[in-house]
Amino acid sequence: MNLVGPFIALFAVKGTQKSGKVLKKQSDLSNLHNSRMRWAVETDAVVLIDLENVRGKSDFGLSHGELLKRTILWSKANNLQDKVTFFVDHGSIHTAYYLPDGGLSMVFAGPRMKADDVLARDIAFFERNAIVITADNELMSRCRNAMLNSRADIEVQFIQPIKFICDLENIVKKTVTIEGVIDSPMTTTEGQSECLDNNNQDDANVLPPELVQKIDEEIKLRGAMYETDIQMREKSNMSTPKKRRKLEKRARMLCERLALKGGQSLDHLTTLNGVTEYDRNFQDEVLKQWEKLRQTATRREMTGDRILLAEYFRRKIESISLEQNHEAPDSAKSSSHSLRYAQYIQNMSGNNVATCMGSGGIQQSSRSDGFDHSKASDNRPLRLVVISDTHGFEESLTPDGGMLPEGDILLHLGDFAIDNSLKKKAKALENFDAWLARQPHRTKIVLRGNHDPFSVPFPQSGANYFCKPKSIAIDGKITIILVPYSSPRNLSSSWRNLPMFCDILASHSPPHRILDKCYNGANAGCSSLRGKVERMIAGPPHLWLCGHIHEGRGVENVAFGLTSRETMVVNVSNANDGRATRIQYDPVVLDIDTNGNINVVQGQGIQSKSSEQEQKSAIVAVQ
């Protein structure tokens, strides 16, 4: 009896049913996509594109310039000109550019932020419906929350990058069929064509092989360090001493190899601060040649490559934007949502604005006092005014109970509450909020201390209260990790979501055995937090601010973990020794620039000690 035929027929029927379901699903997705595009046009929505996420879905086969050219054609075909904004990871500065001929703007996140953070922060800025093109589920959730928290009656829809790429392909095919060539505003003039398409130029300037090898090795080492850091954050990989030692040995070896090879080629090629061994023309030439090399490279594109490619793209866009904005009439710009947003980002640049990295947001207070923002520049240092352990005596921080010194950020490291009855605690919290509201700082951050409640509203001051570790970026240039009082278990679970590096660490607890000696002689610092900082594969922070131990007020320079670079640890506790009964010390004011240089402007018991430590370090360096 032949049983093969019926089986074949059965599988053929099932295969046909399965393919029919796939085709139906694709048809449904296509209809959903088309309905969202119609909704965007009908509701005058803006389109926000996560550029690297789209490139990633093309397996990084689309270059920045090619994706830009195709998007301009796509926005024209869908009547979305002056409503499209690209968000780009990396770039030497956090800035934005408007391209009148293309009808869109480009926003670069900078070296210390992600494009996701900027997009989630600013999606409600437009005060209108939005289409976000991304496949990042976390970014989708953050965008939805941002829209819900906005006062305007607006909503957000999402388009998958794969469908967007298919749309771009179809637009290109139609353009080629109808016009014979791809005619885009980015390639209409001779100068712009040279900027965005270097494939037709002669390879007159070829990079020296030793420089190519040096950059390539640094990119690979940084990629290996990043992967090792991810492994070290996984609890299962650190569960036994043997596993921990193995990963720490690998991390130390990678750090040493990177240090031996210089380890700063990428920074020198992308920085604009002038502190580099390369001049601007040489930087431009290397970045240009690196893009050409990537077009024929067999190695997969890594984060280091994207840093170089994004900076080269930013410089090309900068030159094109200057040319197009100079030629475009003002009437063509008046109603552009993209232009308005680009101007907003440009005005923000240099003002040391804080942006939350990951879920959540940072509230900015309206400032009538403080720094003169008309004098802001990209090189202005960040000024921090730091206090801790005020225990209800915050009015005594200044002689007349007035305002604190001016600065960009007011940072309270915890223990602001009092130990008393519920009624008196509530009244003290209300007074603390009112006191914060009188302070001139645009950004006010409060960490939870061991005496503080888990949830505190700050309706008057709009201060940002953190009960879990979080990271923020300042102008995309300086990263701050905030660590409130936490148990070792909660600290470990939250730490895995934080960046692999930071410039400043602000915690309630000091590191174990550093500025943590109590009145009874015991060391009460956090050993768990110190261990995590020692294992930061990209190096410890330049500055560690802490409080908690009143007797520990002072400063100390310490080399943590895998690198020999010293960290300035500052305990800023304001209360008297032992149980807090009064304010004994004044606020600490510090300036920190993008190169990690720290200047203690004010701080009783800290200014003198920091200058003494600097002198000792200088003597050791001379010897």
Image (spheres, rainbow, N blue to C red):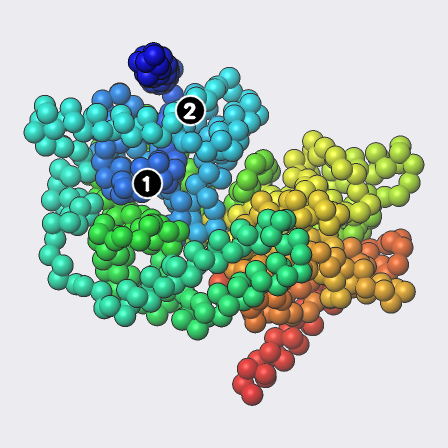
Residue to which mark 2 is pinned: 158
Left or right: 251, with 196 as reference point? right
Quarter the C terminus occupies: bottom right
Q: Secondary structure at mark 2?
A: strand
Three-letter code for the amino acid on which mark 1 is drawn: Asp
Q: Earlier along the polypeptide chain: callout 1 or callout 2?
A: 1
* Residue marked by disc 1: 59
Number of the front mark, 1 or 2: 1
Residue 117 at x, y percent in the picture: 49, 39
Amino acid type, residue under disc 2 in the picture: Phe
Note whether 389 is above or below 596 in the view shown.
above
**Residue that sits furthest to the bottom in the current view:** 623
- Residue at image coords 48%, 58%: 225
Name, please, the residue furthest toward the right: 421
Can you name the residue that lies furthest to the left here?
180
Relative to 515, residue 420 above or below: above
Q: Residue placed at 32% from the left, 26% from the top?
A: 163
Residue 413 seen from this side? yes
Q: Is residue 496 above or below residue 29?
A: below
Mark 2 surroundings within 10 Å by alpha-carbon count, few (fewer than 14), some (14 through 19), many (20 or more): some
Asked where in the image residue 232 lies, by quadrant, the reply is: bottom right
- Between residue 377 and residue 228, name the one nearer to us: 228
**Residue 226 image position (x, y, % from top left):** 48, 54
Relative vertical location of residue 57 with respect to residue 319 in this rendering, above or below: above
Check disc 1 and report its element: helix, strand or loop. loop
Residue 421 placement: quadrant: top right
Q: Can you see residue 267?
A: no
Instruction: Give the residue displayed 81% in from the left and 64% down from the top.
Output: 523
Please rate how many residues cluster around mark 1, counting C-alpha atoms within 10 Å: few if below 14, some from 14 to 19, many from 20.
few
The structure residue drawn at horizontal position 48% and vertical position 53%, both measured from the top left corner, is: 227
Image position of 533 (left or right of 147): right
